[in-house]
Amino acid sequence: MAEIQNSNPTIRNASDLPTRWGRTSSPTTKNDPLSFFASSIPSSSYPVDPFEPAPASGADSDDDVVEPIDEQEIYDLISTISDPEHPLSLGSLAVVNLPDIHIKPLARDLQTVLVEITPTITHCSLATVIGLGVRVRLEQSLPPRFRVDVRIKEGTHSTGDQVNKQLGDKERVAAALENAQLMGVLRKMLETCQ
């Protein structure tokens, strides 16, 4: 990575990114001496209280229960991945977008997650690395019933077909994941994941 290809990318404000978790804005006053710390204290507004006992159900085991996973949850998993070229997330650079994530039934108990990524520039040389980072994140995070398909969104990259061919080839992906230098880049990208 000798030089940055897109030194001035369009950046989204974090408050404009879609998320399932509600944003809380605590009112601060100039007279309150602790107002400086108010933004650094995590809020306690969980959608579900993690310490509240779960309601009793008729089943003895939850092993047979399949929790649904939707596009928003997929977005939340991958939007915090760091861009390999900029100190920003893929969500804030609009490389990953909620409308470009699709979950489709594949077979009886299988589903395919399709993520279309949009590089910041049409000749981005790191598009394959970004796609590989998204693939690794999802394969590590999702249950085995999901198949992951990461592609370049049509018309957003000059060599999109070639990049898609690389990202879709299991043997190339496996070989790439054996490369120590590339794995170092991927680890750095995934450090920021929540």
Image (cartoon, helix red, strand yellow):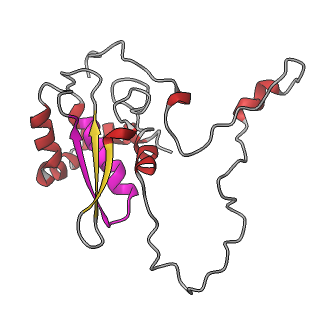
Measuring from the top left, give residue 111's x and y in whole percent: 29, 62
Closer to the camera in the image, 154 or 169: 154
Measuring from the top left, give residue 71's x and y in whole percent: 40, 49
Can residue 58 be seen in the rendering of this structure? yes
The relative height of residue 102 versus residue 157 in the rendered view (above or below) is below
The relative height of residue 120 versus residue 74 in the rendered view (above or below) is above
Measuring from the top left, give residue 31's x and y in whole percent: 90, 19
The relative height of residue 63 versus residue 134 in the rendered view (above or below) is below
Give me the residue at 27% from left, 28% from top. 119
Looking at the image, residue 76 sits to the left or right of residue 28; the answer is left
Measuring from the top left, give residue 13's x and y in whole percent: 51, 24
Give me the residue at 56% from left, 87% from top. 60
Quadrant in the picture for residue 188: top left
Task: Single out the residue that lies furthest toward the right.
Answer: 31
Can residue 183 be seen in the rendering of this structure? no
Looking at the image, residue 121 sits to the left or right of residue 175; the answer is right
Looking at the image, residue 100 sits to the left or right of residue 172; the answer is right
- On whether residue 131 falls in the magenta region, the answer is yes
Give me the residue at 38% from left, 59% from top. 142
- On whether residue 193 falls in the magenta region, the answer is no
Task: Single out the residue that lies furthest toward the top.
Answer: 8
Quadrant in the picture for residue 2: top left
Q: Which range of residues does the magenta coloring cover? A: 129-153
Quadrant in the picture for residue 83: top left
Give me the residue at 73% from left, 37% from top. 41
Closer to the camera in the image, 145 or 20: 20
The quadrant the N terminus occupies is: top left
